[in-house]
Amino acid sequence: MNIAWLSSIPGAALGAAVTYRVARIQWGERRQDAAERREMEEARTRREAWKNDYDSVHAMLIDAANLAYQVSHRGPLTRRDFADLETALLHTNLEQASQRTPDELEAPLLEVAKYVANLLPQAVASDAETLDTYELVRQGEAAEVPAERTIRSEHIRAVAQARAAEDLEAAVRAARRALTKAWGG
């Protein structure tokens, strides 16, 4: 009997076992790489699927930030100012966008929409409206200045408008963070 032949059997078995183990590791790595590629492709597909919504939400958040800036630096704003900035339309668009974007954006967008809506009733009278009202009283055509049009009530609305703008700025920052996270950034 040839002893060299017997000693080569354990060596061959060991070699086969090592080869098998290496092949299993490589197969597992290939499966993991393929899974990672699939995940990346799915993420890219999801991102592309809501790219238009992302762009529109991003634009709305810029408009909301601009609105807050206008109130804070140019305000208080009148009904006409709010109309020129299309505030009511922005509110509606934000509410609608919250329903068509990923779930993690719903609450932040609704929060921004809420603060945009809070600004609308805080519109102050224009200087012309205020002067006209006081002139009617001075001429005797009106008994008194309506309570909602006194200087004090206008001041209260202006302060409430400034506070609502601060809240809006904070909500926009939170929504931008959520949008960036949802986008994958």
Image (cartoon, rainbow, N blue to C red):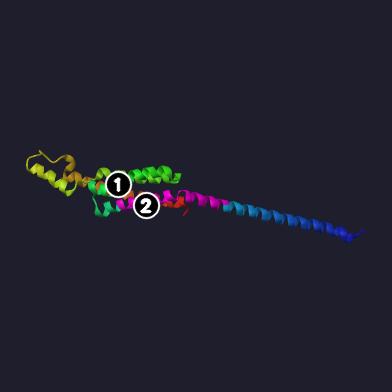
Crowdedness of circle 1 by 10 Å Cα count: few (<14), some, many (20+)?
A: many
Residue situated furthest left in the rendering: 139
x and y percentages locating residue 117 in the rendered image: 31, 43
x and y percentages locating residue 9 in the rendered image: 84, 57
27 left or right, relative to 52: right
Q: Quadrant of the N terminus?
A: bottom right
Q: Tag on residue 113?
A: none
Residue at x-position 29% and y-position 53%: 69
Q: Quadrant of residue 93?
A: top left
Residue at x-position 85% and y-position 59%: 7
Cβ atoms under marks 2 and 1 closer than 8 Å = no
Residue situated furthest bottom in the rendering: 4
Residue situated furthest top in the rendering: 143
Q: Quadrant of residue 29?
A: bottom right
Crowdedness of circle 2 by 10 Å Cα count: few (<14), some, many (20+)?
A: few
53 left or right, relative to 24: left
Give the extent of the magenta segment.
38-67
- Between residue 106 and residue 52, name the one nearer to us: 52
Q: Which residue is mark 2?
A: 59
